Image (spheres, helix red, strand yellow):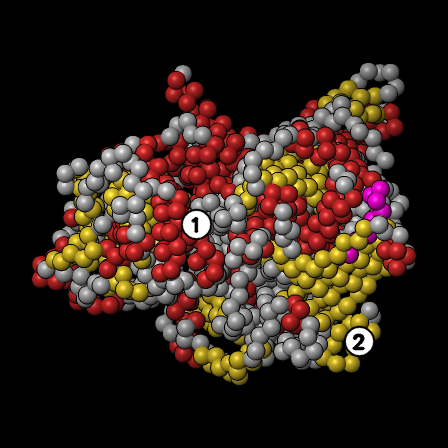
Amino acid sequence: MRAFEYVSAKTVAEATSLLYEKGDQAKPLAGGTDLIVMVRENRRQLDRMVDIKALPETNVLSYSPDTGLSLGAAVPCHEIYADDAISAAYPGLIDAAKIIGGTAIQGRASVGGNLCNASPAADTIPPLIVLGAICVIAGPNGSTREVPVEQFCTGPGQTVLENGEFLVSFKIPPPPRNSSSFYLRFIPRNEMDIAVVGAGASVVLDDTKTSFVSARIGLAAVAPTPLLAEEAGGSLAGQEVSDDAINAAAEAAQAIARPISDMRGTAEQRTHLVGVLTRRALTGAIQRVKEA
Amino acid sequence: MPRKVHVQTTINGETAEFLCEPRQSVLEVLRDVLYLTGAKEGCNNGNCGACSVILDGRLVNSCLVLGAELEGKSLETIEGLAEPDQLHPIQDAFLENAALQCGICTPGFIVAAKALLDQNPNPTEHEIRYWLAGNLCRCTGYDKIVRAVQDAAKTMSSEVSA
Amino acid sequence: MADKKEYKVVGTRPIRHDGVDKVTGRALYGADFHAVGLLHGRVLRSPHAHARIKSIDTSRAEAHPGVRAVVTAKDFPEVEDKIADLGEGAANLKDLQDNVLAGDKVLYKGHQVAAVAAIDPHTAEEALELIDVEYEVLPPVIKVLDAMQEDAPLLHEAMKTDEMGEKADKPSNIASHFQHKQGDLEKGFAEADVVVEHEYTTETVHQGYIEPHNATALYNADGHLTIWCSTQGAFAVREQVSEILQLPVSKIKVVPMEIGGGFGGKIQVYIKPIAAMLSMKTGKPVKVLMSRADVFEGTGPTPGSYVRVKMGATKDGHITAAEAYLAFEAGAYPGSPVGAAAFCVFSPYKVENGQVDGYDVVVNKPKTAAYRAPGATNAAFAAETVIDEICEKIGMDPLEFRILNSAKQGDIRIDGPPTPHVGFVETVEAAKDHPHYSAPLEGENRGRGVASGYWPNFGMASSVAINVTADGTISLVEGSTDIGGTRAAIAMQAAEVLGIPAESVTPSVVDTDSVGYTAVTGGSRTAFATGYAAYEAAQDVKRQMVERAAKLWEVAPEEVQFADGMFSTVNGKEQEIDFKGLAARLDETGGPIVGRGTANPDQPGPSIGVHVVDVEVDPDTGKIDILRYTATQDAGKAVHPSYVEGQIQGGAVQGIGWALNEEYIYNEKGEMTNASFLDYRIPTCLDLPMIDAVIVEVPNPGHPFGVRGVGETPIIAPPAAIANAVYRAIGVRLKELPMSPGRVLKTMGKI
């Protein structure tokens, strides 16, 4: 590991200029559970880490049924799932926040960091996708822009962030009536593992809770970036809730998966699991609507 | 090379000051700068829990926090658990239950168990196993560790009610 | 045979003597050692699985600010080509040296190539990047069967197979082939009503101790070398370092620090000679630590293997013949535990007609090291699942079959020696009688399986000294690394002899200058053999105490008896004094008492374990969940039952990990791709139920309290027991380890 400089930014503007100065040799530091390991193992070399945890903007955690959730990029997982209202409104996101690493990781790791690490297998990205999260990005000279979360990652470890930009927070719309979300992954152990495949689903049902109004499906670890399975989710709109509809959506999800074989699983295993997990994610989300 | 940074923090209730390189983790600072060697390095990437400490009330892996990030924070380590003349009930329970063999993971487990019982005084077996999944033990098969945490929970809640 | 006796201390559950230090974080492990002026060493490792080293240029590293020394294989003295006994396994010294720092070739990714000492660990790491090594990359060979092919890339161009004692004429990766034979195999199979034969493969797995290897060395100008380290055997470190660096053993002191697990993997030396070489060059103490990746890529895993087992039995359940073909990956240098696999594979059973062929084969992986019952788990996975299929075919309860065929005292083991007094039947019966075995198991995709595991256990040399303290306690000095509570188990055996509580013993594990020779903590020998030495040392103390009492009372020593902690006269004068009282009067009766005991016991007494497991398989994902687990085992006499249970539970869980997910995963370049605790998946506590450990006690006549070693046996049965349970759950037999979800799905035909 090369020596680097540590700076704790006091304002968003300071953070962006500290990042801009060093270009790709600087990175924002939130929970650090990925970044510190990457730098330590020489998978990434940096001159500067810019700690963004002291900024009010990255620590915001506020929810209202009218405006939805504003989630700072540095808020650690445990703070999110400790909030009952947020847990009730976005159960799919909570499913993911509770399984990243172990308890000690969740004491530091943030959803924002999980996204910016841009792992194809990141657990929080499929739920963020199915919940329609928007990324709020700050850039040099006071600029800001918003990007839908499914467009944020551009490849393994690659994002849309330009020089001097960093992720400040997420905006997640309020959950519609008769809706819920669910995320699960397949791992060989029961915890402390990286998804072999991850699947998230959000569903909106009609008032009788027997038909889909709409649905979104997000997948992890089956392509260079987490995917929004648009057709798979779209195919459910207007359909009756049934095994056939769910199976068809799962097959559509399988069709867009382009997994690789690596030490965590083979391509065939992953494609198979996309079907299994999509069915289980949809079923789980439907169950939650029915139980609500 | 970037200069060392000066950090003022609280460790086990007492003010501590140290100099560290920005690339040094809290684990390195504890072990190599402050000689608090109770936190162990098992993996140095957050997968074994042997370096568990409590930072501002939250369980964290000290290998995944930079020493520089401790400025103004409060840290609890295994060295701070026991009173001069009395072990913490979790420590007693580990001894009574023979919940250690080689003992290298033990400080991490005890710190993690304390963090659990501080926020959930009466956990189920599943909650204990879930909470401790980030702490690896290769000797015991975990049976006696889980029982020790269950026993400690009982002792601690009876102490509170007494 | 030792009778079942009641004891006062043996069999109780005192708090371990080193407990408070270990729950408060005060116990000092190898990496916790600190010295004034300490330098930090780091090791450069081969990025290639197989390559010739064309050149190494260390000049840029040496010039890096803060670097104090760089070493390579050129810094080694010449050594003879000879075999050194390392306690649990043996090694050729040239190989040992070559494994510590590669000479002409690197033989696996992670092979140590050079090392740096610098003012801090980060500077040392930076300097590693400045060492220029030119490699000629060679094709690697990773799997045992590939390595056995005639056209396989050769690791050691001059190595020729030792073919049952004869040297072959052509070079090969097969280091040796041996064979054991009993009876008439053909006749045996002809008598069988049922014959089952299958092929099995197992992948490389690691001991997975949580503490990485470590060493701090200080070489003094007077030629004395001190090494502080965690090791399973301080004397084994002394011997290896002595041979590798050609220093007399009398000039080396090894100070054993607390050890964070070993399981056989901390006997071979890797970085200890390097720390010593760096200290020789700098004159400063040098601490070398491994990272977790270093541990996976550079230290002894246990072999991947190919095993073929064929067994025949009659309709009424008698084994008529058994045959095994065992090919084991030794890693980069010869010395796999295939020999142990061979004498374990059928040993729970009476096999009159049998044959076992063993092959020791080198591959481009780290040199394998001992791992808890080395070799036995690979072999039992095959034999115990073949037995399960035989039982299914003849419609016999698998535990009934094991009782019927149990080897009894005098039955000949396949490699020749007779079975000693054992508790095989009693242990199977304990499993059969356990409520678990008869409990209903309901629900889909669930199944129950059983299997046995056999390990012969080892004796070997131990030394103990006891000093009697004036306050009536004793200090006990021993040389056995305490890896899981053996200080207590050894102290308790001395306490039993002297009629004092366990708490009145202060046990210390000391350095190689301070106690007599003691072999490694391995082979399940420590509570047994060092306990035996403690028994002898306590007997020596007792004899001397009796003499002191005689002196005090002015009687002949024969007139003094010792029972229930009291010395008393047998001459009717009714004088008595307890141990504490007499200890206070040593000054007036002749001065201090030091007791000494050595042991090299030759009847360690095999231990068998019988495991019962319930599993549930998710047929959509292939994941196996362990629902319930019971492990019975013959401990002879459990000295400290809590720590015996702990051994059984911990060993069972290592076996469960081996069964379910643990494996070295290699890419086509021969690189391990999962060298972390994230992707080398040892079980977490969330993957397991409670493990019910049932201690069976059939005393070992080779030990004064009947002790048998217990550490190794419990790892053997789990993979076979789980495979048998999976078969009952989903109707397919897994013949590859680990039974990871992908393999289960494949075997089920789902992918």
- Magenta range is C310-317
Question: Which numbered disc covers residue A276?
Answer: 1
**Three-letter amino acid code at the position of disc 2:** Lys
Front disc: 1 or 2: 1
Q: Position of residue B97 (x, y in %)?
A: 55, 31
Q: Position of residue A259 (x, y in %)?
A: 41, 62
Q: Which residue is mark 2?
A: C167
Is the same chain shared between marks 1 and 2?
A: no
- Quarter of the figure with the C terminus of chain A: top left
| In the image: residue A1, left or right of residue C557 | left
| In the image: residue C331, left or right of residue C536 | left
Q: Residue at x 85, y 51 (%)?
A: C192
Does C351 appear above or below C215?
A: above
Does A173 appear above or below C149?
A: above
Observer-nearest of C253 and A215: A215
**Three-letter amino acid code at the position of disc 1:** Val
Q: Residue at x 73, y 44 (%)?
A: C392
Q: Residue at x 75, y 81 (%)?
A: C170
Tell me the element at label 1: helix
Question: What is the crowding at mark 1: few (fewer than 14 residues within 10 Å), some, or many (at least 20)?
Answer: many
